[in-house]
Image: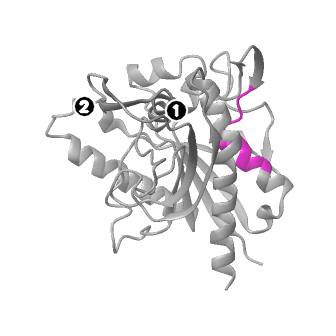
Amino acid sequence: MQKTKLVYVWSLRNAAADKAGQYVDYHGEQRYMTSPLEYLVKALNETALGDHYSLEAIIYDENSESARDRESIKDYGFAPGQGAHWFYPPGLAVQGRKVDDLLENVPSSYRALPLGDSARPAGKSDFERRLGERLHALGADIVVLDGLLVILDELVREGADFHRRIFNVHPGITRLESPYERRGAYATLDALYGARGKKVVDWNTREMIDIPVVNMTGASFHFVDTGIDSGEVVFDVLDTPIAADDTILELRWNNFNNSLFPALEQGLWVLARQRSY
């Protein structure tokens, strides 16, 4: 059986904020923060999922020339050994290949430009072009995004080569009809406020309103379209209880282990079964 070639695109900035690969405080004890990438590697090594997929590359979009990016990942650096920590254990291998050898950089350099800069659209288009060229060179069948803080357009619009071939694993329920819906970059914080009976109506000012308590959250594996976490859901899991006194990292740990990891694995199984017919 020919394996589906999977390319993983992630944000080191997000992983650093999660303290991936480190032990974090968890209600008076210490727990290891496994990243979605490390979980995927384990699933490919230890389950039948590895019979269906081969991990071809791991692409990150940080820009080493950006002072902001350097600050965001200062505890890690841009490669293993550059910082005090790294995002997964030394020597980690996937399907007989060192994970370190799969790391590649396609920087989204345009992010350094001010939001209103007239050069940003062309810069973003250039990033998508370079990313698409690399995906083609790798022979990617599907692409999984993890925390990429770029809203793709040209790569995923209808008629594009990677239309309905790029997927995102998101730490929230993305179905608009769900009372647990949490789209966007603030999904985890939004869920945490919800467990405290609050809803942020303006993320710039942190203006809030009172709402009924919503003390559950989940995760979604979905197609990527040109919106914000608005693509068709492949598989989602709502299995993460929230305590009002959770910290953001405690909730991230819970949601990864209870909802996001299962959503990622089961979403890939759905795709594998579809391709086998």
Q: Provide the secondary structure element on which disc 1 rests.
A: helix
Mark 1 packing: few (<14 Cα in 10 Å), some, or many (20+)?
some
The image quadrant of residue 107 is top left
x and y percentages locating residue 116 in the rendered image: 16, 34
Q: 144 or 108: nearer the eye?
A: 144
Q: Which residue is located at x 45 percent, y 49 percent?
A: 179
Q: Earlier in the sequence, mark 2 or mark 1?
A: 1
The range drawn in magenta is 32-42
Label number found at residue 145: none
From the image, tell me which residue sits under label 1.
Answer: 14
Mark 2 packing: few (<14 Cα in 10 Å), some, or many (20+)?
few
x and y percentages locating residue 119 in the rendered image: 18, 40
Q: How many marks?
A: 2
In the image, what residue type sits under mark 2? Leu
Of all residues, the one furthest to the bottom in this rendering is: 277
Residue 70, placed above or below residue 174: above
x and y percentages locating residue 245 in the rendered image: 59, 20
Magenta stretch holds residue 99: no
From the image, tell me which residue sits under label 2.
Answer: 113
Q: Which residue is located at x 54 percent, y 59 percent?
A: 143
Label 2 with label 1: CB-CB less than 8 Å = no
Q: CA distance from mark 2 to mark 1?
A: 20 Å
x and y percentages locating residue 133 in the rendered image: 44, 59
Left or right side of 90 for 197? left
Magenta stretch holds residue 34: yes
Dominant secondary structure of the residues highlighted in magenta in the image? helix
Q: Which residue is located at x 78 percent, y 62 percent?
A: 50
Q: Is residue 39 visible?
A: yes
Image quarter where the C terminus lies is bottom right
In the image, what residue type sits under mark 1? Asn
Image quarter where the N terminus lies is bottom right
Q: Is residue 101 visible?
A: no
